Amino acid sequence: MNAGIAMAVAMAIAVVWPGLPSPKAAAIPTGSCTDHPAHAQLLLQAGRKLGIAVRQGSPELAGKDASYRALHGRPGVITIKPRPMAPAVRCQLITHEFIHVLQHFGARLRGVEPLGWPLSPGERSRFGSLQEAEAYAYQNQPALVWQLLEAHRLDPTRPK
Ligand SMILES: [Zn+2]
């Protein structure tokens, strides 16, 4: 990370966290990857503070553009394929993998369990597992995922 990016991230955090530890609701980021693809940067920053490594490379799942390896007992590794993609798509990929991070933290790093988020019957049946259904159903909600990652950082004992 260069100093310019660090400064920009610090400023972004200052803007969204004006009153730690209880930020004003209005200051919490809102919006989707479609509207605010730069929210992906907030997720990467929050993940770094939680010990999540993010690297470019070949995802472990064939045919996927990204993967999360959940390590046993410690934060895992997100791998993103280095290929050109629209900012909104990249934001959704990152949000998707960070939902798996939340599933891992929710299981206290001992597995990857569903978060229990609301899903339609179609979403439940379409993706093979509840974990994937949640990740696909909410991958356009980076602000929601960011808030939950920050909640883990501020209170690591929080179950979900
Ligand atoms: Zn997934």
Image (spheres, helix red, strand yellow):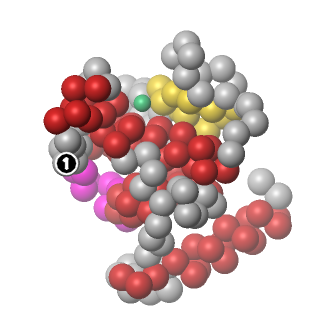
On screen, residue 69 above or below 19: above
In the rendered view, does 57 fall on the left or right side of 118?
Answer: right
Q: Is residue 158 magenta?
A: yes
> Is residue 116 in view?
yes
* Residue drawn where x is 30% and y is 34% of the image: 133
* Residue drawn where x is 52% and y is 50% of the image: 47
Q: At which x and y percent is residue 27?
A: 46, 82
| Amino acid bearing label 1 | Pro
- Please state the quadrant of the image where ligand 1 appears: top left
In the rendered view, does 119 fall on the left or right side of 3?
Answer: left
Front one among 82 and 1: 82
Q: Quadrant of residue 145?
A: bottom left
**Magenta stretch?**
152-160
> Is residue 107 in view?
no
Residue at which label 1 appears: 118
Q: At which x and y percent is residue 22?
A: 35, 82
Q: At which x and y percent is residue 56?
A: 70, 31
Q: At which x and y percent is residue 119?
A: 21, 43
Q: Quadrant of the N terminus?
A: bottom right
In the rendered view, does 107 fall on the left or right side of 31?
Answer: left
In the rendered view, does 115 fall on the left or right side of 99?
Answer: left
* Residue drawn where x is 66% and y is 77% of the image: 11
